[in-house]
Amino acid sequence: MSLSSTALTNALARRGSAVLVAGILVAAAAVGGPPQRARAAAPAVPAVETTAVADTAGSTTVLKGFDVQSSADVPDSAQTVSTPGYQPAGWHRAGPRTTVLAALVADGTYPDPFYSTNMATIPTQPFTVPWWYRSDFTVNDTSARSYLDVTGVVSAADVYVNGVRVATADQIAGMYTSHELDITAQVHQGINSVAFLIQPNDPKKNFTSGWIDWNPYPPDNNMGMVRDISIRRAGAVVLSDAHVLTSVDTPSLGSARLTVKAQARNDSAGTVTTTVSGTIGDITFSRDLTLGPGESRTVTFSPADTPQLNLTSPKIWWPAGMGDQPLYDLRLTATTAGATTDTAHKSFGIRDVQSSLNADGHRTFTVNGHPLMIRGAAESVDLLWRWNAQEASSRITYALNMGLNAIRLEGHLEPDEYYDMADKAGMLLLPGWECCNKWQDSKDYTPREHEINRASMAAVAAQLRDHPSVTSFSVGSDYAPSAASAQDYQDALNAADWTLPVLSSNNIVNSTEAFGPSGMRMGPYEWVPPNYWYNKRGGEDGRGAEGFNSETGAGVSLPTMDTLRRMMTPGELDTMWKNPHAVQYHRSPESEHFNSLDMFGDALNGRYGQATGLDDFVRKAQLAQYEAVRAQFEAYGRNFTDATNPSTGVVYWMLNGPWTSLHWQLFDRYFDQSGAYFGAQKANEDLHIQYSYDDRSVVVVNRRTGASDGLTAHVDLYNPDGTQRFHKDAEGLTVPGDGGKTVALTIPENIPDLDTTYLAKLTLTDSAGKEVSRNVYWLSTKQDVLDYGNSDWYVTPTSAYAALDGLNRLAQATVSATGTSTTTDDGTTKVTVKLTNTATGNTPALLTDVHLVDPQNKPLLPVTWSDNQVSLWPGESTTITATVRTADLNGATPNLRVSGWNTPTSNTTVATP
């Protein structure tokens, strides 16, 4: 039965147990040089492995994969295709979650679409017709009932089991809807077959996902399956929609109340009496109920009727950096006539999230009674929707490593295990629908489209509501939904017992009566200088760090040379640096605003001096990206506690690239880290000293929960030749916690003999004299000038550039590196690196980068650094650490590759104990 055919309260489909399945990644090709070209035709492959379905009531078995083929190449009838014994000769073998194009890339039918313009050479015509997805499964015991759980279909599908159509494409529509199909009558002992005839996808017409202006669209528009398809077994009574409502007393956090709810349904032909029992740790509870044939009833265990659900001293879940992340487990069992007929399991956390608008109309959040400034970035799934558990975990790890506390998910909502990872890591999530496609174009929905809209919200609410990492849901992105669509969402959310904040949109100019003003704004998305973020101007355009900005950033984010050579041809790279105004396929070639490197290239050449070659262009880009991202996060951090128009949250656009991109990313598709990454990491230190581009103040920001005192700020200014021109200390500083700040001192406006380009070294020491924060800026007495009169939604132009070309006069500096590796019990290797500026004279080593590389000089990725791209003056040393998965070393000893703005590249072998 489809979701549209039942009341919403009974339609929240139970999600099956998540299974970690690593997708096949084109990104796994060796670093350096183009990938191998594909064969012209698909190779012959055996049929996908038959799935053995468990017999136990309450079990869920994920189908292991599918044989995939275009309907244009299958002359057989649907009944024949979906019958056991059918031979899918010449079909493509695919994993359990795969789009059509992902399957065709994996088996070599098409070349790596992430390299050069390969994706543009893949024809779109094969994906204009339906495609078959076929799989076999075995059942030994047919005494239990069988259910086919279907979700993640892009865009819609007819479903057949053993020659019988059990659902139509009109019913199975929308990638986020969930469907429970009772296939007991079709399943027999032995081998069974299931087949899906999947319809082509158009994000403008179907409730799926698109790519807006992020990058080129894949030729298949992601048609296929992006979630597990499962066979679930149960007895007469089926449990579904299990969830836990939590309420915690704030600010004491000394007690909490739990409410457990589930649907119990009798799928037998007779009346049955069943016992629904549950456990949460040591807490137990149960209830008997009698159900007539086909009857479904909500079972509720409340603190009033189940006193043990009143908790004293509950374990409270906190975001990372604010506390621990304890989780509770709910387990439910339905027992009928002494036998288990079904089970359900949910993991949940106890925490309190509140959101409101402040006096200035800006969105604010609190967690467990503490004020929370959102410091986030917007994540994207892989362009072909390939799931890889290790990569998903690394995205969260990287975000935490940069000091972020939130990840926004616009439309590209992840599978269950991703939210489990975020729960355990303490990473807040801001999911919501996508802009600029069917979700946004809601004024003219047909009655059936409203049903799909409601069903989508119902299924997503059921998936997300128990995860403590989930902080809110946005029912609109750039635009709020229509009143009718908002009502769909409100009905579905109410039926799902949704208790978290619901946002009308991510844009302050759009709101709904149902959910109120958004209190959030958007942009810019193109290059702006660092001082942009410090100017509070009011109005929507050209406004810096105030309020809550749900998506913003300085646009272009060039990867490292390693990645650039991996994703583009030498000719394309040559054009990139020589002509930044040329259309770049690896930006957004169909967007009039984001299809080139024009604004970024002009700023790079205008501020740092004309590039002399590819290496010089990329080298300068890393400095520009570091300062741009650092300034954005620093400005928002400084302004969080302002008395008027404070900043309340910022989401960098974006966290990662869905493919090999030249823009909108803090790290690239292969997890290499450029200046943007380390600029964010520096800005988001928990105790941080920073410079203000607007008033030259030196500020200390404290993100720890308690105050920090006994601090001393040290400020030094240097000319490019290393001559010191200013020094001042500010002692005895105390900084309040929870994002509080203290102004240490203000640098004078006029300093004698200071060059047009100069360096500022800020250090913060504790009461014992230990350095706890270091921050180095390259600045100019000639400021960047913003043209606010021509501000637009995506950029405020720059009419004059700061003069930073004096950095080209920095003398060469030598940096020595020593490294020692230690293997830990958790499967990782930690490399401790000591860097020392061994140069004589006064010249600092600016933005010294360390890469962990294999013996062939290829980056070892992913890797998390405690710090990187550091600046050292002669005689100074620092120690940083890198952590990698031991398995990624392949038994080899890693090397350190050291380079920098004015440091020659060198390699050193890491020592092993």
Image (cartoon, helix red, strand yellow):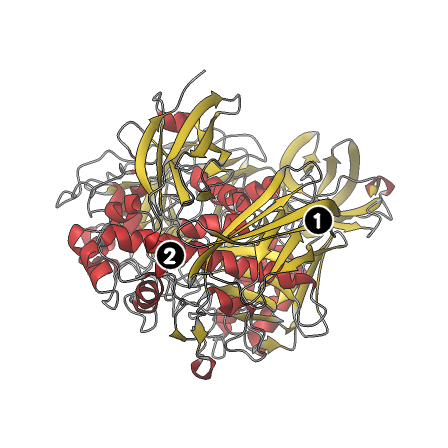
Evaluate if marks 1 and 2 touch, with contact meaning CB atoms under 8 Å apart.
Answer: no
Q: Secondary structure at mark 2?
A: loop
Camera-side residue of 493 and 27: 27
Q: Of 723 and 808, which appears nearest the observer?
A: 723
Q: Which mark is residue 731?
A: 1
View extreme (top): residue: 913
Residue at the image point whose x is 46% and y is 84% from the top: 789
Labels 1 and 2: the sequence-earlier one: 2
Q: Badge 1, how many Cα within 10 Å: few under 14, some, many 20+?
A: some
Q: Quick check: 696 left or right of 116? A: right
Identify residue type, mark 1.
Glu
Judge whether residue 449 can be spotted in this image.
yes
> Residue 387: image x %, image y %?
41, 44
In this rendering, the answer to whether 153 lies above or below 41 is below
Report the side of 220 relative to 320 (left or right).
left
Give the vertical position of 34 relative to 694 (above or below).
above
The residue closer to the viewer here, 196 or 302, is 302
Q: Which residue is mark 2?
A: 557
Identity, as a three-letter code, of the amino acid under mark 2: Ser
Q: Nearer the viewer, mark 1 or mark 2?
A: 1
Please, is residue 530 above or below residue 318 in the view?
below
